Image (cartoon, grey):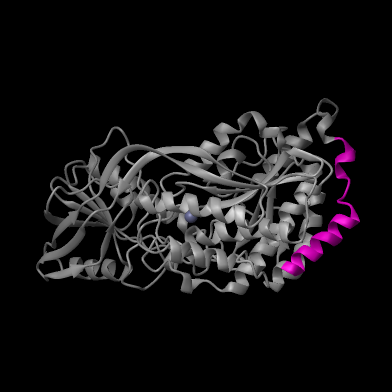
Amino acid sequence: MSARPFLASILSLACLAALPAFAATDNTPLPADALATAAKLRDAGMAGDATDGSSAYDIVESLTTEIGERLAGTPPAERAVEWAKAKFKAFGYDKVYTEPVTFEMWTRGHEDANVVSPYPQHLAITALGHSVGTNGPLEADIVEFANLDALKAAKPGTLDGKIAYISNRMQRSKDGSGYGPAVMARVDGPSIAGKLGAKALLIRSIGTDHERMPHTGILEYTADAPKIPAAALSNSDADLLSNMLRRGAPVRVKLELGGEMHGMVTSYNVIGEITGRTRPDEVVTIGGHLDSWDLGTGAIDDGAGVAITMGAGALLHRLHLRPDRTVRVIAYMDEEAGSFGGKAYAEAHLAQLKRHQLGAESDFGAARIYALHAGVKDSAWPVIEQIGQVLAPLGIVTERNATDADAGPDTGEFAAKGMAWAQLAQDGTDYFDWHHTANDTLDKIDPKALDQQAAAYAVLAYLAAEAKDSMGSGEMPLPKPEQ
Ligand SMILES: [Zn+2]
């Protein structure tokens, strides 16, 4: 369901006189000089000719080369925090600081899987994030379920001593809408299988590729279920296992997973600001997440998002632009295990909710942006339309009632508390081929596509920061983002 019709119905029912924030003066469009400046900003971003290492591609090249994978809480993630502080400073941000983020740390350890009988073969698997280990080899017969619903419908006891296996395949789409329905097997599957008596869970990777490359990603154990080890098979190996099972004889698998929790640790969101000219305590936030999974180098998830938004702020500085409000770029920590950076930011800044003009986030890979979506009060929609007009030459269309509009995982935490938000929707057609795999590496990124995105974020941040009136944070129930 689109959140927009819901919002419109609230507005039509509301007594406007009782809500002075909706006065007609909020329709004031952006001034012509701000729009002209934004067009220059867009064109400078598209030129991609920064020589100081502040182009989005140079930034993600630096992060993946000098740091690489950066699983939250581990030493490389801590090096990434220092890296981000140094980059913000080098690119002329006038305030650079960190804010604490506390979360439970996990490491993967050794992992291996083999079919023991009837067709002995190695299987390419990887543990799901936060999975417990197997405590030595675990050997059991496999029971296949076509999807999570089929597992939920299994009779108690049918999985006693077995390894459950969920085999549904994620569907490819531009907006990534295949992810939501498929990913629940990963998130909820382990506890559902555990309650049914399974010793472990295997799932087909939540990914659209045909590579022998398993996709990791977080699971969520529930308090009322035994914690069982859980891993993803590559799509190729999921096919293999299903083909073996279809022959009818019991298929026995030996699984070894070394996953381990290490208790609570504190790391940091890293923040850089271009301080506002006339309203420095009002902010527009843009950002991505600094942590990544440990299999690849975290190039598309989410080195690209950090680079695009850090590069956008650097572009403002390079063109000597200081908008009315502060532009705050946030490199969030530990998005992957549950948007902990976004949650920490929302909690720490709740009292300043109304001073947040707009929030946006890049966390959907590195392919070009094709649409502008937003969750703002109705009277601020003309501002979004004007921003959209500046973005139109980049191939970006403004869509008011998009059903797939989403504030993003970290920004969504504050948007759920009432922050106005925008989404620069990226083409996700190929994203889930590489997402959360060892294949998430720099060679998947087109530098020109990153220029388009950094240009778009610079325009969005600049114009939202220049808009005369509030876009609605804290004033009314804004559309609730999907998680
Ligand atoms: Zn991500």
Q: Quadrant of residue 366?
A: bottom right
Residue 88: horizontal and vertical position, in percent? 60, 53
Is residue 209 at least partly visible in the picture?
yes
Q: Quadrant of residue 38?
A: bottom right
Check the image and report above or below for 135 versus 13. below
Q: Nearer the viewer, residue 482 or 403?
A: 482
Check the image and report above or below for 184 versus 478. below
Q: Please provide the residue range marked out in magenta.
A: 23-44
255 relative to 353 in the view: left or right: left
Taking the view exactly as shown, the residue that stands out farthest to the top is 18
Q: Is residue 30 magenta?
A: yes
Q: Nearer the viewer, residue 47 or 169?
A: 47
Check the image and report above or below for 105 versus 237. above
Q: Nearer the viewer, residue 151 or 198?
A: 198
Is residue 398 at least partly visible in the picture?
no
334 relative to 399 in the view: left or right: left
391 relative to 289 in the view: left or right: right
Q: Nearer the viewer, residue 210 or 455?
A: 455
